[in-house]
Image: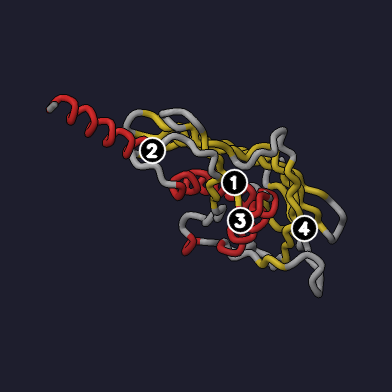
């Protein structure tokens, strides 16, 4: 009897750590890429009005943001609110550039924008795999960026990609969102670091 009780308690404890079997539920994730060291944010040397245009979902799959595979079988699904990752990327990039001190305006607003940044989502995926006593979180992103300069009609193109991973003891959707948002913040930081402003136009810093 004692051995049976120990086995039952052990099973309960393991289930508490790894989570129950998948129910097919959809877990919403909030994309909010806040830059590290906001207090050190540097505005562009020249005043620049930036509008964020549409981000097309160009992924080969359109089944949310990924899955959580449960130790005992079954899966849950990750997605953004409203099921439109392009809109979520637009909001996240707007928040990031605003926090960096950039002047982000609505496209088509009075006075117009000096630069319109738009793009395509090539990859945006997260996977949480339940293992014994921990959950492994991995994510991968790839964004094609297009910046259209109003002054001369020139276009700046960039591809921003990144990956991240973390192991957590207790599964929490906020941890999954944090890993994904950290990767997006790195993507957006590359956009800021690898460009410069010249005559109210965005240019690449490299050759």
Q: Residue at x 77, y 59 (%)?
A: 115
In the rendered image, which residue does mark 2 sit on? Answer: 19
In the rendered image, which residue does mark 1 sit on? Answer: 79
Instruction: Point out which mark residue 15 bears.
Output: none
Element on which disc 4 rests: strand
Q: Position of residue 110 (x, y in %)?
A: 81, 75
Say whether marks 2 and 1 touch (CB < 8 Å): no
User: Which residue is situated farthest in the right direction here?
Assistant: 153
Q: Quadrant of the N terminus?
A: top left
Q: Position of residue 171 (x, y in %)?
A: 39, 42
Q: Quadrant of residue 103?
A: bottom right
Residue 148 placement, left or right of 41: right
Element on which disc 2 rests: loop
Instruction: Point out which mark residue 116 bears.
Output: 4
Q: Residue at x 72, y 58 (%)?
A: 52
In the rendered image, which residue does mark 3 sit on? Answer: 92
Give the mark nearest the N terminus, 3 or 4: 3
Q: Quadrant of residue 92?
A: bottom right
Measured Cα–Cα span from mark 3 to mark 1 = 15 Å
Measured Cα–Cα span from mark 1 to mark 4 = 27 Å
Q: Quadrant of the C terminus?
A: top right
Measured Cα–Cα span from mark 2 to mark 4 = 44 Å
Residue 53 placement, left or right of 17: right
- Nearest to the eye among marks 1 and 4: give it: 1
Give the mark nearest the N terminus, 1 or 4: 1
């Amino acid at each position: 009897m004692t051995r049976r009780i120990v086995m039952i308690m052990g099973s309960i404890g393991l289930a508490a750590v790894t989570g129950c079997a998948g129910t097919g539920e959809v877990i919403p994730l909030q994309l909010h890429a806040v830059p590290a060291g906001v207090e050190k944010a540097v505005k562009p040397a020249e005043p620049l009005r930036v509008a964020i245009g549409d981000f097309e979902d160009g992924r080969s799959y359109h089944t949310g943001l990924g899955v959580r595979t449960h130790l005992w079988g079954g899966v849950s699904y990750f997605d953004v609110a409203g099921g439109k990752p392009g809109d979520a990327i637009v909001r996240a990039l707007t928040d990031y550039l605003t926090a960096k001190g950039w002047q982000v305006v609505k496209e088509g607003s009075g006075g117009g924008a000096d630069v319109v940044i738009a793009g395509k989502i090539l990859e945006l995926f997260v996977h949480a795999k339940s293992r014994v006593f921990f959950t492994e979180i991995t994510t991968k992103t790839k964004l094609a960026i297009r910046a259209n300069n109003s002054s001369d009609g020139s276009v700046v193109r960039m591809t921003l990609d990144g990956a991240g991973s973390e192991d957590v003891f207790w599964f929490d959707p906020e941890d999954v969102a944090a890993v994904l948002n950290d990767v997006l913040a790195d993507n957006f930081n590359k956009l800021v670091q690898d460009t410069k402003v010249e005559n109210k136009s965005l240019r690449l810093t490299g050759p």
